[in-house]
Image (spheres, rainbow, N blue to C red):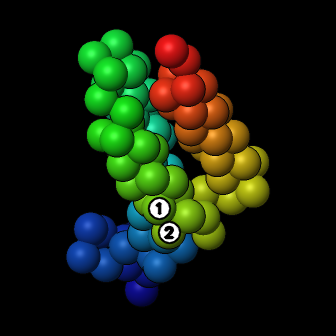
């Protein structure tokens, strides 16, 4: 009797986990990229508080998804968001 092939409803647990990980990684990267664009717009219009909130929200998401991202992607996103924070602070302190 042949083994039953996995289907969507009967997919192997590791395949479901891999798919979930890919989705979470893609989603997190999209949010970080969107945040980069939003912050640029906020800085152009002097909306510093909104820029800070956007970076903070993206950083929370990155931290929540740390296990799915792995060390490399987690560090990449964290560094990128820290650079954004530095940009905001620098822009706020300019006369």
In the rendered image, the residue lying farthest to the front is 95
Residue underneath mark 1: 60
Which quarter shows the N terminus? Answer: bottom left
Give the x, y percent position of residue 3. Answer: 44, 80
In the rendered image, the residue lying farthest to the left is 9
- Answer with left or right where residue 53 lies relative to residue 25: left
Q: Is any part of residue 77 visible from this angle?
A: yes
Residue found 63% across the figure and 33% down from its top: 86
Mark 1 neighbour class, 10 Å CA radius: few under 14, some 14 to 19, many 20 or more: few
Give the x, y percent position of residue 30. Answer: 39, 37
* Marks 2/1: CA–CA distance: 6 Å
Q: Label 2's element?
A: helix
- Answer with left or right where residue 7 lies relative to residue 69: left
Dot label at residue 46: none
Residue found 39% across the figure and 54% down from its top: 57
Mark 2 neighbour class, 10 Å CA radius: few under 14, some 14 to 19, many 20 or more: few
Relative to 6, is 60 above or below? above
In the rendered image, the residue lying farthest to the bottom is 1
Residue found 51% across the figure and 54% down from its top: 59
Residue underneath mark 2: 64
**Residue nearest the viewer, comparing 64 with 12:** 64
Q: Are marks 2 and 1 in contact (CB under 8 Å)?
A: yes
Relative to 68, is 38 above or below? above
- Answer with left or right where residue 66 lies relative to residue 9: right
Q: Quadrant of residue 70?
A: bottom right
Give the x, y percent position of residue 44. Answer: 34, 13
Q: Nearer the viewer, mark 2 or mark 1?
A: 1
Q: Label 1's element?
A: helix
**Residue nearest the viewer, comparing 87 with 5:** 87
């Amino acid at each position: 009797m042949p083994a039953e092939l996995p289907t969507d409803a009967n997919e192997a647990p590791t395949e479901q986990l891999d798919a979930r990980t890919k989705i979470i990684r893609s989603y997190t990267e999209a949010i970080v990229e969107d945040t980069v664009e939003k912050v640029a717009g906020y800085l152009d219009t002097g909306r510093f508080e909104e820029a800070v909130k956007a970076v903070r929200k993206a950083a929370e998401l990155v931290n929540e998804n740390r296990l799915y991202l792995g060390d490399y992607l987690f560090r990449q996103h964290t560094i990128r968001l820290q650079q954004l924070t530095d940009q905001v602070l620098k822009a706020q302190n300019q006369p």
